[in-house]
Image (cartoon, grey):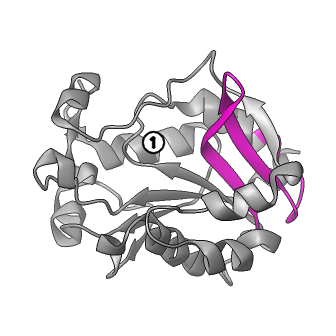
């Protein structure tokens, strides 16, 4: 199984402009003394993703300058303002031809989800047909793992802020749910009130 893990690339969606945070890009929010995007990359790596692609958008140049992301493949999404769907498409596109057989997708604004949840979802990977999602008390959340066989279908339906939601609804029976409620908290950093979750 360990051999398979190298076939799964981490895909971090970090392009959001933080509209409800007064236009502060989420990737640059401070967490434990460093930009939040660094923390999110570290979580993917600690959870078992040896290679990580990071989709940037809002203030991408500032993120490149301030965050230490040397070992990552940085993907700029010029259409980031259109919503998460465009970032997911850009990220999956960046993985085409790299040898990755699956993508483990996480969001930059969920610092309550740590390496344990990533490792559990990664552990359920089998092949390019895999569709795996973390669950919190049985409710689907992040991270999610998309086998390569699903990428084209996901890209075709990922619009606005929906991401892969439509595709996952259509393929509900194929999803392996991995309970992570005991090791992670799936809150988002969306508003000023949510900043209490950052250290």
Magenta residues, dominant SS class: strand
Asked if residue 104 is positioned above or below residue 183 in the image, the reply reads below
Task: Please report the residue visible at 19 percent of the width from the left and 32 percent of the height from the top.
Answer: 33
Q: Position of residue 14 (x, y in %)?
A: 37, 58
Q: Nearer the viewer, residue 82 or 111?
A: 82
The answer to which image quadrant residue 80 occupies is: bottom left
| Residue 82, image x, y percentages | 35, 74
Q: Which residues are magenta?
A: 123-147
Where is residue 28? Give x, y as percent: 21, 50
Instruction: Confirm whether residue 7 shows in the render.
Output: no
* Residue highlighted by disc 1: 42
Magenta-drawn stretch contains 117: no
- The reply, left or right, for residue 117 in relation to residue 64 is right
- The extreme left residue here reads 22
Q: Report the residue at 70% width, 64% height from top.
A: 167
The vertical placement of 22 against 57, above or below, is above
The image quadrant where one finds the C terminus is: top left
Q: Quadrant of residue 117?
A: top right
Q: Quadrant of the N terminus?
A: top right
- Any magenta on residue 124? yes
Residue projecting furthest to the top: 182
Q: Residue at x 16, y 34 (%)?
A: 192
* The quarter of the displayed image where residue 13 is located: bottom left
Give the total number of marks visible in the rendering.
1
Residue drawn at (28%, 52%) of the image: 27
Residue 70 relative to residue 50: left or right: left
């Amino acid at each position: 199984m360990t051999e398979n893990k190298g076939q799964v690339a981490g895909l971090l969606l970090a392009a959001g402009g933080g509209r409800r945070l007064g236009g502060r890009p989420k990737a640059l929010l401070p967490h434990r003394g460093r930009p939040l995007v660094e923390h999110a990359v570290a979580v993917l790596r600690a959870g078992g993703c040896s290679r990580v692609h990071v989709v940037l958008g809002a203030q991408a140049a500032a993120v490149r300058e301030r965050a230490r992301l040397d070992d990552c493949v940085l993907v700029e999404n010029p259409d980031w303002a259109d919503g998460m769907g465009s970032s997911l498409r850009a990220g999956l596109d960046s993985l085409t031809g790299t040898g990755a057989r699956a993508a483990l997708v996480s969001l930059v604004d969920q610092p309550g989800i740590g390496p344990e949840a990533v490792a559990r979802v990664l552990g359920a990977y089998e092949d390019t047909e895999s569709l795996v999602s973390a669950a919190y008390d049985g409710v689907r959340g992040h991270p999610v793992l998309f086998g390569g066989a699903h990428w084209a279908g996901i890209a075709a339906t990922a619009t606005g802020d929906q991401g892969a939601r439509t595709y996952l609804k259509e393929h509900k029976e194929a999803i392996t749910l991995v309970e992570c409620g005991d090791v992670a908290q799936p809150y988002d950093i969306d508003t000023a009130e949510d900043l209490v979750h950052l250290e």
